[in-house]
Image (spheres, helix red, strand yellow):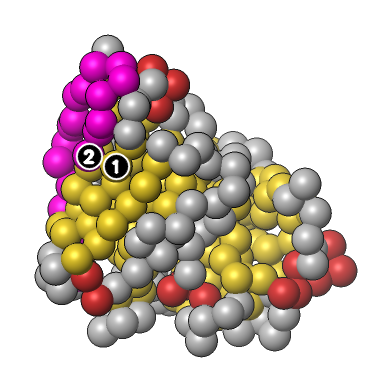
Amino acid sequence: SYELTQPPSVSVSPGQTASITCSGETLGNKYVSWYQQRPGQSPVLVIYEDRKRPSEIPARFSGSNSGNTATLTISGAQPIDEADYFCQAWDSRTTSVVFGGGTKLTVL
Amino acid sequence: QVQLVQSGAELKKPGASVKISCKTSGYTFTTYAIQWVRQAPEQRLEWLGWINGGNGKTKYSQKFQGRVTITRDTSASTAHMELSSLRSQDSAIYYCARTSLRYFDPAEDAFDIWGQGTLVTVSS
């Protein structure tokens, strides 16, 4: 089955750029979405179709996807951005949804 | 605003079934799909299936085929997910989420709005 791999954790200082990767075979041929999940809360969509941002999401969130890796970038990360981040794609072979294991972002 | 409000926490015994509801508001129910996802402790998010709010068509993850049933009540703008033959490994938070119908398979789209989650605990 198709798998998405994320690093378990990423840590940055406030104001630095945080990059969270998501790897999968020929992932660049699929659309990737990214979700933010703060403790005790539901996931929130922050990036869809690799690089599009819902209107309510701050511009410091951006995405890219090429080859086997998609990347979520948070430019000028803030303490409020501390959360778990999950990537997601649709596997056309099994016509099913696949999620990455999640990355815990620490900003301090 | 768009909201998905789920039913409350459930405690079930092994072998039982659980049925969770997802009441939507703030948009036209029949023009979107509802997805179901679960999150077990220390596990990644896991997709269960979806229902087309318009025509009622469903699609289930192969892993849960035969155990999961997703239905809808258009008059109440509500979707339901029933999981049967529960075991302890089914203990998790279950989420509903919305996707558009612009793709042939609604699961291709991003999950733009999520419910608050329903905790299901399976224990004897």
Expressed as whole percent of the image width and height from the top left, the position of residue A70 reads 23, 57
Magenta segment, prevailing SS (helix, strand or loop): loop
The spot of residue A5 in percent (x, y) is 16, 53
- In the picture of the structure, the residue carrying the numbered disc 2 is A19
Of residues B80 and B88, the one drawn nearer to the viewer in this rendering: B80
Q: Residue extending furthest top?
A: A108
Residue A86 against residue B46 in the figure, above or below:
above
**Residue B16 can be seen, yes or no:** no
Q: Magenta stretch?
A: A2-19
Tell me which chain the residue with mark 1 is part of.
A
Task: Indicate the secondary structure of the residue bearing disc 1.
Answer: strand
The residue at 33%/34% (across/down) is A75
Q: Are marks 2 and 1 on the same chain?
A: yes
Say if the magenta span includes residue A72.
no
Q: Secondary structure at mark 2?
A: strand
Q: Is residue A10 magenta?
A: yes
Mark 1 is on which residue type? Thr
Q: Badge 1 is on which residue?
A: A73
Query: Looking at the picture, how far across and down is residue A15, in whole percent?
Result: 31, 20
Locate residue B25 relative to residue B32 in the image: left or right.
right
Instruction: Relative to A48, say whether B29 is above or below.
Output: below
Viewer-nearest residue: A68 or A53: A53
Q: Nearer the viewer, residue B57 or B19?
A: B57
Marks 2 and 1: CB-CB under 8 Å?
A: yes
| Position of the C terminus of chain B by quadrant | top left
Which residue type carries mark 2? Answer: Ser
